[in-house]
Amino acid sequence: KQEVTQIPAALSVPEGENLVLNCSFTDSAIYNLQWFRQDPGKGLTSLLLIQSSQREQTSGRLNASLDKSSGRSTLYIAASQPGDSATYLCAVTFDDYKLSFGAGTTVTVRA
Amino acid sequence: GAGVSQSPRYKVAKRGQDVALRCDPISGHVSLFWYQQALGQGPEFLTYFQNEAQLDKSGLPSDRFFAERPEGSVSTLKIQRTQQEDSAVYLCASSFGTGVAPSYEQYFGPGTRLTVT
């Protein structure tokens, strides 16, 4: 079964510290991987999409890496701010069009 | 707005009632998806449309769930005889492309939070 796992489930850091969020998946044959942000009671905001041929993507303070051979992706958020507090979801497109999601990592950035 | 919209944002239903949830995808997006997100979990796939054709309904949890997209734009997810286990956030997403391609990104709406009492 194709699965996506995110550990830890929750993370609390002081403001200014760099955040490292992990995502692992069971099948290396993927089309792409997306990182999303979800605020309480809200929908999903796409942060970064990494295509299967790419090793990383960057947007502002965000950088996501992809290592298909080991089935891992890491989202780095530099110099965290209280506004970064949210749940971060990793989603993988395996062999078809549907996204398979991890359960998410809930991040709290303490001021 | 140019994003995916969903209505209602919140719905409370008594057990046994029927509900209908609406999704307006981004204009021109061919693909439309419905996902169900239980509390504390990641979204799970329910069904997929390519234009008006429902190509995959493998994620629908029971025959009480029904989805349609008759004109290839707006979609409705209907749940008949709601049960407490149907309580969740129902998310709609749309994508420009069809099939699968590494560059195809799904854009999500704000979701409908369904509470069955």
Image: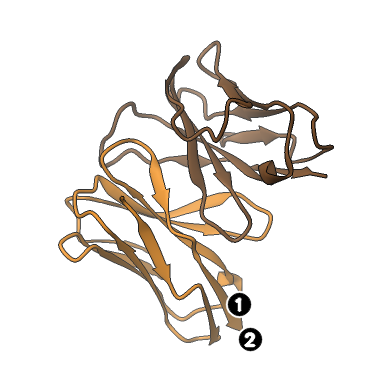
Chain colours: A orange, B brown
Query: In the displayed structure, does residue B93 sit left or right of residue A74?
Result: right
Judging by the rendered image, the residue that carries numbered circle 2 is: A111
Residue B2 percent across, percent down from the top left: 56, 34
Query: In the displayed structure, does residue B70 sit left or right of residue A56?
Result: right
The residue lying toward the viewer, choosing from B40 and A51, is B40
Q: Quadrant of residue A12?
A: bottom right
Amino acid bearing label 2: Ala
Q: Quadrant of residue A39?
A: bottom right
Asked whether the beta carbons under mark 2 and mark 1 sit within 8 Å of each other, the answer is: yes
Q: Secondary structure at mark 1?
A: helix
At a point 54% along the width and 19% down the height, the residue shown is B73
Residue A56 percent across, percent down from the top left: 25, 62
At a point 33% along the width and 38% down the height, the residue shown is B104
Locate the C terminus of chain A by quadrant. bottom right
Amino acid bearing label 1: Pro
Q: Is residue B110 visible?
A: no
- A105 versus A20 height, above or below: above
On residue A37, the disc is none
The residue lying toward the viewer, choosing from B78 and A40, is B78
- B80 versus B38 height, above or below: above
At a point 55% along the width and 78% down the height, the residue shown is A81
Query: In the displayed structure, does residue A31 sit left or right of residue B69?
Result: left
Residue A100 percent across, percent down from the top left: 39, 48
Nearer the N terminus, badge 2 or badge 1? 1
The chain carrying label 2 is A
Residue B1 percent across, percent down from the top left: 62, 34
Judging by the rendered image, the residue that carries numbered circle 1 is: A82
The chain carrying label 1 is A
